Amino acid sequence: MEIIIKKRVVKAIHEGLLSLTMLSLTPAIAAASEANLKIPNLSQGQNNLLLYGIMVCILGMLFGFYQFMQVKKSGPINLCWMWPT
């Protein structure tokens, strides 16, 4: 029984060391930064599509806020329906 436990402990230590090694090497692999990004030139249609997407996101946020205010105004929630008697 102790041998199995020792094998599991050794395996866990090896996996931990491998994970730590991979984690420490990750920044060296991904050496790119935002300064190296190339911003593409967008056509008018692509630019409009991005703006429509932003408008949809803003409308979604407003709808979510409206629903939140409706729920908040409704007062305390009656949970009797959850537990039948």
Image (cartoon, rainbow, N blue to C red):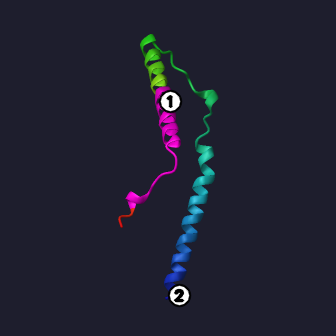
Q: How far apart are the alpha carbons under marks 1 and 2?
A: 61 Å
Q: Quadrant of the C terminus?
A: bottom left
Q: Which residue is mark 1?
A: 62
Vertical arrangement, residue 16 with respect to residue 69, above or below: below
Q: Residues within 10 Å of mark 1 (few under 14, many from 20)?
A: few
Q: Is residue 62 magenta?
A: yes
- Range shown magenta: 57-82
Say which element carries label 1. helix
Residue ID at (45%, 11%): 44
- Looking at numbered disc 1 in the image, what kind of residue is underneath it? Leu
Q: Which residue is mark 2?
A: 2
- Depth check, front residue: 60 or 45: 60
Q: Where is residue 83? Give x, y as percent.
A: 39, 63
User: What secondary structure prevails in the magenta region?
Assistant: helix
- Depth check, front residue: 51 or 80: 80
Q: Where is residue 71? Give x, y as percent.
A: 49, 42
Q: Given the current orientation, which residue lies at the most extreme bottom position?
A: 1
Say which element carries label 2. helix
Looking at the rendered structure, which numbered label has been put on residue 20? none
- Depth check, front residue: 22 or 61: 61
Question: Which corner quadrant of the image does residue 78 belong to?
Answer: bottom left
Residue ID at (62%, 33%): 33
